[in-house]
Image: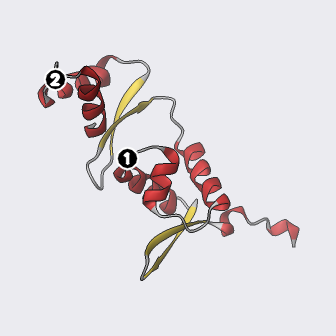
Amino acid sequence: MIDLFCLYNRARGTDLISPEDMNIARMAIQDKSNKYMLKTYTKSGIKTIQLKTFSETSYYDKINQSLVENPGMTADKLATHFKINVGVMKEHIQEAEMKGFICIDESHEGLRYFSNLFKTFDITAI
């Protein structure tokens, strides 16, 4: 919501809207839109507007595929790759890790993320 507020006001130039007006618009989207919905992440409290047709599973597969192609990416690099806010990406990473799509490596360099090879491992190939 913060990014949307900034982008909207930047596009308007000098005719800015207040945070209260943005909150009113958010509530209207939540109540009346057939296409969009409000999602609040429980851990951080970050609020986003997303399509109702958004599929978390396919999105986590895309994150996993990015990590297959570029192993050891950080949250910042993933956020840049997917062109989303770092805070939102961290929420997606946590959910993807909890659901087994990706693995986390913590070292003195910080957190890095990798594809979960155990999830994609084909036991019948042995």
Q: Tell whether 113 sits left or right of 124.
A: left
Q: How crowded is mark 1: few (under 14 residues within 10 Å), some or many (20 or more)?
A: some
* Front-lying residue, 11 or 83: 11
Residue pointed to by mark 2:
17
Q: Residue at 31% x, 22% y: name it.
A: 29
Q: Which residue is drawn at 71% across and 62% down?
A: 120
Would you identify the image quadrant in which residue 36 lies? top left
Please tell me whether mark 1 sits on a helix, a strand or a loop.
Answer: loop
Q: Which SS class for mark 2?
A: loop
Mark nearer the N terminus (1 vs 2) = 2
Q: Residue at x 51, y 57 (%)?
A: 96
Give the image location of residue 122, x and y in percent: 79, 65
Q: The disc labelled 2 sits on which kind of residue?
A: Ile
Q: Name the foreground residue: 31 vs 114.
A: 114
Residue 62 image point, x, y percent: 60, 48
- Badge 1 amino acid: Asn
Q: Is residue 121 above or below residue 21?
A: below
